[in-house]
Amino acid sequence: MMRLSWTENVRFALVAMRAQKLRSSLTLLGVVAGVATVIMMVSFVAGFDRSVTTAFSQFGTHLVQFQKFEPRFGGPDDVPEEERNRRDLTLDDAAALERLATLAAAVSPERYLFTSGEIRAGARIANSPTIAGVTPAYTECNNSAIEDGRFFIDADVRHAARVAVIAADVADALFPLQDPIGRSITIDGRSFQVIGLLERKGNFLGGSNDNILLLPISTFDEQYPQVRDDGGDTLHIATVPRRSEDVDALIEQETAILRTRRGLRFNQENDFATFTSMGMLNNFRQITGGISLVMIVIAGISLVVGGVGVMNIMLVNVTQRTREIGLRKALGGTRRDIAIQFLAEAVTLTGVGGLLGIALGLGVALLARVAFNFQAAAPLWSVALGFGVSTAVGLTAGLWPAVKAARQDPIEALRYE
């Protein structure tokens, strides 16, 4: 009886692939492309998710911020008229939240200069840092810390002191290889003293978190009164809860306080926006989810094409090896033996394609890590999934050729020329 084990069937399949290198290679392209796409998709999405999660954690994962305009991608021209007509948030709103929001650990009103100011130290000029006016609560609400010197105190805000706290990029530009604490800088022509240096945070989505300069908010309003008075999104109020599990309750409590202060009736919508770092993170994850879906569709198309190619080559093999099939049956081979032989060849063919696709996908992910410092990483389950899908394609595509081979009449097969 000519009964072969799975190991022997696989070995014969590999011999057949080597004998027909060009045809086998062309057949495997679809499987390789599909599996490589799956591996690359999972690697890049996992890396992007890790990078974005790390970046948003720099704001503090429990940040709750109130502002005039809804958070969105785009510039001021993209703001709808309804939002432009909203009333500005005020320092009194921030004071009310600090006084009445019992779940809040800290409340930080903040103003930002969205145009470039000139910051100099002698002949050196900073690279257009973001300038912000803040209060002593800024560090707690924004997950920041002082590396050297000190942060603002209430007296700095009360007296509009001409002091500044700078981040690492500003320090590197103005005072390379020097301690910036106690040194003088000019901001748009007016002199300030550097009293603190923020700990380095790194990059966020391709931009630096360390190119920022902070002033007491009262000093900022003296320096840039146009920001306070221009009717735009002039004040952001950042808050954090006392306990991480109270984020939702804090949003509800602070929203009620602001609605009451602004005289909104129960049936009126909020005339202010709420931003949370976790909410923005979830938005990014929805984007990556959409990208993943598109990639899965592309991978599926590639695998279907690869499966059709495998089925075609296996049908050709059945035709070319008709006499071999007849001989095996004449020597006692059963339909099951013949079917298993051709199924093993199909699975071996797509299994090799799956392994090549996994290698290609992992290679591209490794290249992204080395060349772009992008933390792409393929979890073990994605590798197992890629190989499992490729073998499943082989089983599906090889089923009809295997059945066709098993049904061959041994007498007719032996006569086949």
Image: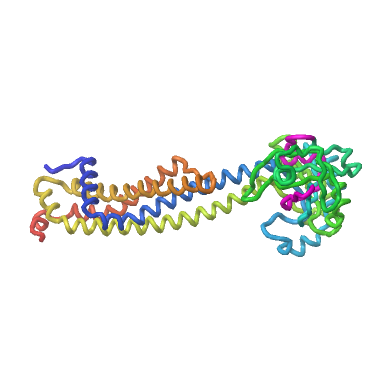
Range shown magenta = 122-149
**Foreground pick, 41 / 411:** 41
Give the color scheme: rainbow, by chain, secondary structure or one colour. Answer: rainbow
Tell me residue 35's x, y (percent).
40, 50
**Foreground pick, 230 / 147:** 147
- Name the image quarter holding the C terminus: bottom left
The quarter of the displayed image where residue 137 is located: top right
Residue shown at 21%/56% (left/top)?
317
Residue 297 visible: yes
Residue shown at 61%/43% (left/top)?
53
Residue shown at 77%/36% (left/top)?
105
**Foreground pick, 147 / 386:** 147
Tell me residue 71's x, y (percent).
70, 54
Residue shown at 87%/44% (left/top)?
162
How many marks on residues?
Answer: 0
Check residue 88 for magenta coloring.
no
Tell me residue 219's x, y (percent).
87, 47
- Name the image quarter holding the N terminus: top left
Viewed as shown, does residue 297 lie left or right of 77?
left
Q: Is residue 103 above or below residue 345?
A: above
Tell me residue 194's x, y (percent).
81, 41
Check residue 125 for magenta coloring.
yes
The quarter of the displayed image where residue 385 is located: top left
Residue 270 visible: no
